Amino acid sequence: MALGLAVASSLAWGWMGAQGSVMWGWTASFRADASQAWRWWSAALVHVNSAHLQANLWAAAVVGAWGWTARVGSAQALAWLLAWPLAQALLFTDTGSLARYAGLSATLHAGAAIVCWHLLWHSRGAHRAVGAAVAVAILVKLWLEVPALQQLTAGGNGSAMPAAEPLPDAPGHVVAGHAHGCGVLAGVVAAAMMDGIIGVCRRLRPAPTEHE
């Protein structure tokens, strides 16, 4: 899945370049337009410049390696596939910090969250401890990036959203903290849904019969 997203993003860049983020990206003006729902998929595959793309390709490699090390299976891959559009669909919850969005980061955060879920609920011992440590690191990262969380922990006293931080070596782009939060939420929801579906299927499966 990580490799597929990376390849698709590279092909999109080769085809459209930075213009792809305008043509296929998400903007706040589309949030209530159901006819633009296809952007929930396309926005993840386009980038504002080559540095933005390169940063996300490296991140895709890290998330892919994380999943490989955790030995996730097809259920987690399917959950990530579900989380891909859901991460962008959840951008409607933004309260004004994000006017435009493009890039893999939200979907990659979803993938990382799914691996954490797998380790926390389906592993034991050291593997579960590693999953918990990474989950805590992701939560700290979100607290540092997501404007709504910063306002919440500040008691809601701030009247304006904190300014987004520029992405290093990628002029014209900023860290989309709210999108990262949407990605993590999408990953958790998708992983929980997949576990629920698997549980229901197991309960509905006929019990094996004994043959003499």
Image (spheres, helix red, strand yellow):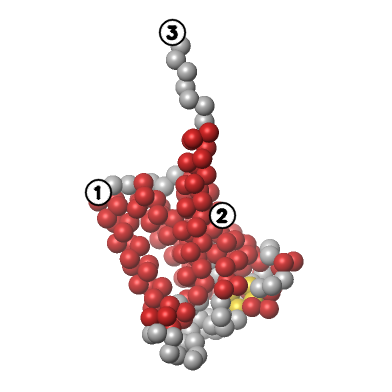
Q: Quadrant of residue 41?
A: bottom right
Q: Is residue 31 above or below residue 195?
A: below
Q: Nearer the viewer, residue 63 or 123?
A: 123
Closer to the camera: disc 2 or disc 3? Answer: 3
- What residue would you read off at disc 2? 82
Q: Is residue 177 left or right of residue 42?
A: left
Residue furthest to the right: 35
- What residue would you read off at disc 3? 212
State the CA–CA distance, disc 3 to disc 1.
41 Å
Residue 98 in picture, x, y percent from top left:
56, 80
Tell me the residue at 48%/25% (across/down): 207
Q: Are marks 3 and 1 in contact (CB under 8 Å)?
A: no
Mark 1 packing: few (<14 Cα in 10 Å), some, or many (20+)? Answer: few
Q: Is residue 27 above or below residue 72?
A: below
Q: Earlier in the sequence, mark 2 or mark 1?
A: 2
Q: Which mark is residue 17?
A: none
Q: Earlier in the sequence, mark 3 or mark 1?
A: 1
Label 2's element? Answer: helix
Tell me the residue at 46%/58% (across/down): 188
Closer to the camera: disc 3 or disc 1? Answer: 3
Residue 76 in picture, x, y percent from top left:
47, 49
Q: Quadrant of the C terminus?
A: top left
Q: Is residue 144 left or right of residue 41?
A: left
Tell me the residue at 44%/56% (across/down): 114
Q: Is residue 121 above or below residue 144?
A: above
Give amino acid for label 2.
Answer: Leu
Q: Which mark is residue 125?
A: 1
Q: Earlier in the sequence, mark 2 or mark 3?
A: 2
Q: Is residue 100 visible?
A: yes
Tell me the residue at 47%/41% (across/down): 199
Label 3's element? Answer: loop
